[in-house]
Amino acid sequence: MRTTRRTLMGTLLTGAVAAGLVCGATLANAADALPYGLKAGKPYAGTKLTYLAPVAGQYEGHEARLKEFTDLTGIEVEFEFIPFRNLLEKILAIKVAGDAEPDLINYKDDWGPGLKDLFVPIDEMMAADKVTLDRYYPAHQLGVTYDGMIYGLPLRGHAQLMFYRKDLLEKHGLSVPKTWNELAEVAKVIKDKEGIGIGMYYSPKAAQNVAVWMNILWSNGGELFRDGKVTFNTPEAVEALKYYVALENDMKVNSEGAKSFEQYDGSLSMGAGQSAFFMGWWWHYGSRILGKNTTLTPEQVGFAPLPAFRGDESTTFAMSMPTAINVNSDKQEAAWEFLKWVSNPDLEKRNVIEKEKRNVIVALHRKNLMDEEVNAANQGLQMAAAGSLESSRIFPQLAVWPEVMQVLANAISDAVSNGADPKEALDAAAEQAQKLVDRG
């Protein structure tokens, strides 16, 4: 790879040298230049880095291409894969012990405020190598920035989308819903005629019900917090929860089992042909809605941004999983070289087109989400995600947010499954959450 690059560079510069426009030193520097801003001369050759990441096809694709990085830099990287459900516990153990390994850590953005002391701020490194966050959408920029400093680069991230049975909408002459009321109407028709509804999920397990309810909340003008005060029990929030509950208990447009569903159940229900709609992360598309254990084909599935609740503006929730450098590592410079390489848009594009390991669909760079080749390889999924990310927001950047989120998830579940009054449930949750915030 390097020989080819040098040959091409020499060919391009031959004419300029002959014309006296390029001096010998400049030619040498150009010939030694490496892609992605990597340092020439392999100054960290022989270094071995360790990298903690969750099990996901995207990271497996990075691992499969490590030879390119080692050939360019002389640095070796060993991946340590761990199930996502165990990732936070593992990172907290590393933080408490002050371990120097792993050198690089992949984490979830809303964990960042509570973990940032474990990570190296990379602002100066980025400035020196002219790496900016402009290549990402605002939600993913915010997900790596705490107290005005940048603590990692987003490698994995999810946009929320509405997946729908394109074939059933066409069969019954229905349009793609753009509002929640339209969704309820369309879902009612399909449920009456086909016996399947929305693969909604209300289980408090993993608190994913909050992520759906927040879209209705934000679209209704509500907020979770204002000036350090909990506000998710305002009239706008109560109305949002009443509607979310009504989809299941009053309108009855959801698929059977929604009260106990978590997000995985919802997408698997759609993949098995038992739901006509699913609201959730786009990664479900490649493994649960479509896949070897599902019954659907790409021609049957459409996707769009989540519906709006008020007017035609939908504000969706987005998350990211940045990779950071361990503050206790003695290999931070080499770790930054890896971070530059693994976050580059060319690698990301290859990952979602070539699909080295699994059906990888995750791309975060703006240019890749709008890229024709990327979208051709993924049925236009990235273009739809770009539309969602234009108006996406992230979880509050509070160290206690994971605890607050679980409190909210329990309140939502209580309202839908146990008949709790939505206002009373949110009032109780707000009181408990405010204590957590004040303590934090």
Image: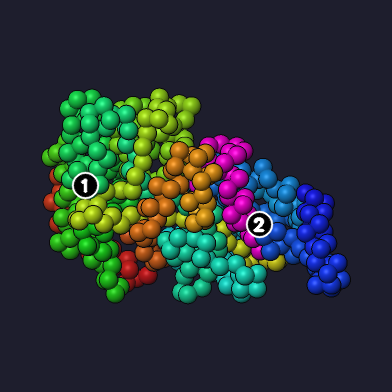
User: Does residue 209 appear in the picture of this structure?
Assistant: yes
Our reading of the magenta stretch's main secondary structure is: helix
Along the viewing direction, whichever of 228 and 301 lies nearer the viewer: 301
Residue 41 in the image: above or below residue 214: below
- Residue 417 image point, x, y percent: 20, 42
Callout 2 touching callout 1 (CB < 8 Å): no
Q: How crowded is mark 2: few (under 14 residues within 10 Å), some or many (20 or more)?
A: many
Q: Residue furthest front?
A: 19
User: What whole-number distance in Å separates the C-alpha atoms at marks 2 and 1?
Assistant: 42 Å
Q: Measuring 66% from the left and 57% from the top, which residue is drawn there?
A: 341
Q: What label sits on residue 380 in the rendered view?
A: none
Image quarter where the C terminus lies is bottom left
Question: Which residue is labeled 2 in the image?
Answer: 341
Number of callouts in the render? 2
Q: How crowded is mark 1: few (under 14 residues within 10 Å), some or many (20 or more)?
A: some
Write the start and end of the magenta stretch as one range: 336-362
- Residue 300 image point, x, y percent: 37, 30
Q: Measuring 73% from the left and 49% from the top, which residue is drawn there?
A: 68
Question: Which residue is labeled 1 in the image?
Answer: 180
Relative to 158, 78 lies left or right: right
Magenta region includes residue 242: no
- Residue 346 image point, x, y percent: 62, 52
Q: In which quarter of the image is residue 256?
A: top left
The three-letter code of the residue at mark 2 reads: Trp
Q: Measuring 78% from the left and 54% from the top, which residue is drawn there?
A: 8
Marks 2 and 1, the one that precedes in the sequence: 1
User: Does residue 199 appear in the picture of this structure?
Assistant: no
The three-letter code of the residue at mark 1 reads: Trp
Q: Is mark 1 on a helix, strand or loop?
A: helix
Residue 94 in the image: above or below residue 129: above
